[in-house]
Amino acid sequence: MHTLFQKKFIIPVIASAFLYVGVSFKDDYFEIAKQIEIFTTLFKELNKNYVDETTPADLMNNAIKGMLSSLDPYTVYFNEQEVLKFKINNTGEYTGIGALITRKDDKLIIKEPYKNFPADKAGLKAGDEIIQIGDTPLTDFKDDASQLLKGSKNTKIDIKYIRQGKTLSTVIVLDEVEIKSVPYFGKIDAKTGYIVLARFNNKASNETKEALEQLKREGAERIVLDLRGNPGGLLNEAVNICNLFVPKNETIVTTKSKIEKHNNTYKTTKEPVDTNIPLVILVNGRSASASEIVSGALQDLDRAVILGSRSFGKGLVQRPVELTYGTQLKVTISRYYTPSGRCIQALDYAHKDKNGVATRTDAKNYNTFKTRKGRTVYDGGGVLPDIEMEETKTSPITNALLKNDGIFQYATYYYYKNPNLGTKIPTLTDADYSDFKQFLKTQKLTFDTETEIALKNTLATAKKENLDESISTEYQQLLTALQKSENNQLDKNQKEIKGLLLDEIIKRYQYQEGLYDYYIKNNAEIKKAVAILNNPVEYNGILKN
């Protein structure tokens, strides 16, 4: 089995010196100059006259980000400090600790250490809360704590952290950490190869090609390409990955903009690795952007069977623009279209509801298109798989558990409760699930579903209007009913939640490679993909070969 470990420090901003897939400049220069002059005058007078001391850099940062928030979430400003991280993710290589870390509620949490890299060698584990880096306590440190974990290779950094209520310390020795696009590849069976493509950085196509060629040398006669959870990245890498499976000079994606120079057609430019090997691509609701270019293009060209659940629906392209003083703007410049002519963008950021939320394209308004061999496909809401598996979709209650870290926190609790499992795959019993539900209550984790948020907002408004006392009884009754409903949803979606719990628990004992080893033997989507590949009549029937 071959592994290429995913090595990163924080969730990367998908960025590059090229185009990203994961506004026209109006000709009225007088109006633009007028608004700039108004803003400049306001900014100067505000800083000069405001009653308290102001920080011009913070005010400007907030002003810019407020302005951009009215557009789409992919048009983003980076100040000087943020540009450093931006450039790190362009190259895929930097000095770091080899772990996924998140900051939540002012806590710096290890989400996943990668095997045999600095954080792992230092003994850090998922769930550890870092409270001090070097001489700097993080309690009141509001800047990006990742900057405290940088330095030259072999730099030693003292770390204090909390694990299961105990304060511990360790030393991390920094090393070169490379973000891998392909964290894993291997054989499912004697004839079926499996490749996980986690992101589209500038090494994505090379790593995918190496994995494909190695699997073919080992006898693979068909391939499962896993794009689940892949948020996207470089457009040109998506084209190059398609090029592994389709001939040279094939149109993969077209970009269209109000600016003529941003209208481009991207074709394959190299000789392919294999244009005939049967291919199934796995996608889900977190497969976005470049993942949708690959799956959408190969679907349109009838080159692969797409399996799973509808993808995220990001049909927008970004380009970085260098600004003054080392700052940068990543701006949406165009929409992209797959070979059949469809744009799979799901949210319309030009039309927002009264709460400022972008509207979603209604399924009844999707337009139909034809693949090369005449199959019907749709735009507007992501890539719809050829084989849609209901069990791969996540319910609202499951999404809430992922958002509030309920699943993550229980896996940490389970790991320390069962320290000696090793490589044994645990079986989550009904008793374990009851324990999980009790754990959620003990930790007082809120689900914050849309309904729950709306109800809490109603009470907050009532308090402002001094109406809360008169409706408190009714409010509590509604809240109790809602919590009972949420508990029922936990029971209704037990199988789905258990699956995600098991995934997280396996990683605690066996790292990422252990999870993929488990997947190729047990995952429902992979089993279905293999079944289709084992049946040429069904495979060819789907693609109308």
Image (tube, rainbow, N blue to C red):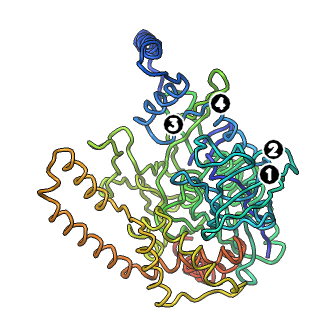
Task: Say which of marks 4 and 2 sits in front.
Answer: 2
Q: Nearer the viewer, residue 324 or 168?
A: 168
Give, as a three-letter code, the residue at label 1: Ile
**Dot 1, how many residues are within 10 Å of its Cα: few (below 14), some (14-19), or many (20+)?**
some
Q: Looking at the rendered structure, which numbered label has been put on residue 75?
A: 3
Q: Secondary structure at mark 1?
A: strand
Q: Nearer the viewer, residue 530 or 8?
A: 8
Q: Which residue is mark 4?
A: 80
| Cα gap from disc 3 to disc 2, whole angstroms | 30 Å
Q: Is residue 42 above or below residue 415?
A: above
Residue at 59%, 73% (x, y): give it: 412
Q: Which residue is mark 2?
A: 151
Tell me, yes or no, whether the two marked residues, 3 and 2, touch with CB atoms within 8 Å: no
Residue at 64%, 49% (x, y): give it: 12
- Where is residue 226 drawn, in percent x and y? 63, 67
Quadrant location, the C terminus: bottom right
Q: Is residue 123 left or right of residue 298?
A: right
Q: Which residue is mark 1?
A: 157
| Cα gap from disc 4 to disc 3, whole angstroms | 17 Å
| Cα gap from disc 4 to disc 1, whole angstroms | 24 Å
Q: Nearer the viewer, residue 50 or 223?
A: 50
